[in-house]
Amino acid sequence: MLIAEASAEQEPSVRERRCIVTREVLPESRLMRFVVGPENDIVPDLAAKLPGRGIWVGADRAVLQRAVDKNLFTKAAKTAVRASAELPQRVEALLVKRMQEHLGLARRAGIMVAGFDTVVRAFSERRKPAILVEASDGAEDGRRKVLAAARAHCLDLQVIDCLTAAELSMALGRENVIHAALFPGPLADRLALDAERLRGFRPRDSMRTGPTPVPDER
C-alpha cells in the first residue's frame, strides 16, 4: 500500500490551462499557446517556450477561428492586439513543419524506418516500433496490409495519418513515402503530440475524401 502511494506521488502532474474560447480546462497537450508579439500581434508558440503571458486556445481550427473572429485575444490579453485572419492556416502550416522536423531528426538518429517492406520487417525485430505513420492519401489496400502485419505480431501501434505522402517525402528526403514507423522515445512522443493537434485542423473525413490515393511505394 505504501509503495503504491509513493509511486503515485512520484508521477508528474498534468499541467492544465483554460481555453479562452470554450472556457474548458484542458491538458496543455490539447491546447495551443499564443503570446503577444512586440508589435501587439498574436504569435503562435507551439513549443510553449516564448516569453510572455501565454494565451491558450483549443487545438481545433473552428475554435481558433472563433477566437480570431470574435477578437477574443484582445479580451484575454487585456490590451488591443491583432490576430491575423490567416492565423488558423498559419498554425496548421507550423504544425506540419514541426512534424516534418521530428521525422527528419528521427531519420537521422536512426530511430525510424520507412517503406512498406522495411516497416513490416521491423514488426518482427526485437526492438518494436511505437508509432506507425501512414500517408493520409495513401492507398487503403497498403494501409490494411501494414495494420494486418502489425496485428499478426500482436502490436497495438498508435497510428498517425494526418500528413500527406508529399509532406512525408519532403520530411524524409525520398520519393513517395507512404508508410513509416518510429521507435519509442522523446521524438515519437513529440510527433504524437503535434499529430493530435494537427487532427483538429485536418479532420479525418476531409483527408479520406481528398485527392486520388497515392500508390504504395513498393
Image (spheres, grey):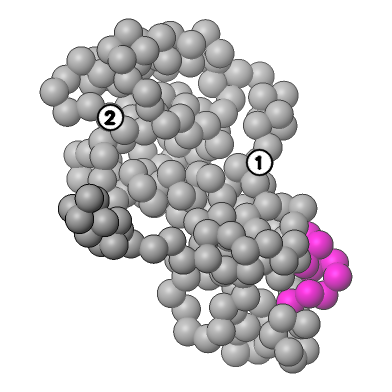
Taking the image as shown, residue 176 lies to the left or right of residue 90, namely: left
What residue is pinned by disc 2?
A: 129
Q: Tell me the element at label 1.
A: loop
Q: Can residue 38 be seen from the camera position used here?
A: yes
Which quadrant holds residue 113? Answer: top left
Mark 2: which amino acid? Pro
Magenta segment: 65-73
Q: Amino acid at mark 1?
A: Arg
Q: Which label sits on residue 98?
A: none
Q: Nearer the viewer, residue 23 or 198?
A: 23
Q: How far, Cα to Cα, is label 1 from label 2?
A: 25 Å
Q: Is residue 134 left or right of residue 31?
A: left
Q: Quadrant of residue 133?
A: top left
For the point 26% across and 36% down, the residue is 183
Q: Residues within 10 Å of mark 1 (few under 14, many from 20)?
A: some
- Work out which quarter of the rendered image holds the C terminus and state it: top left
Q: Residue at x 32, y 20 (%)?
A: 155
In the image, residue 16 sits, relative to residue 40, either above or below, namely above
Which disc, if any, is residue 202? 1
Residue 166 picture location, percent across and down? 52, 34
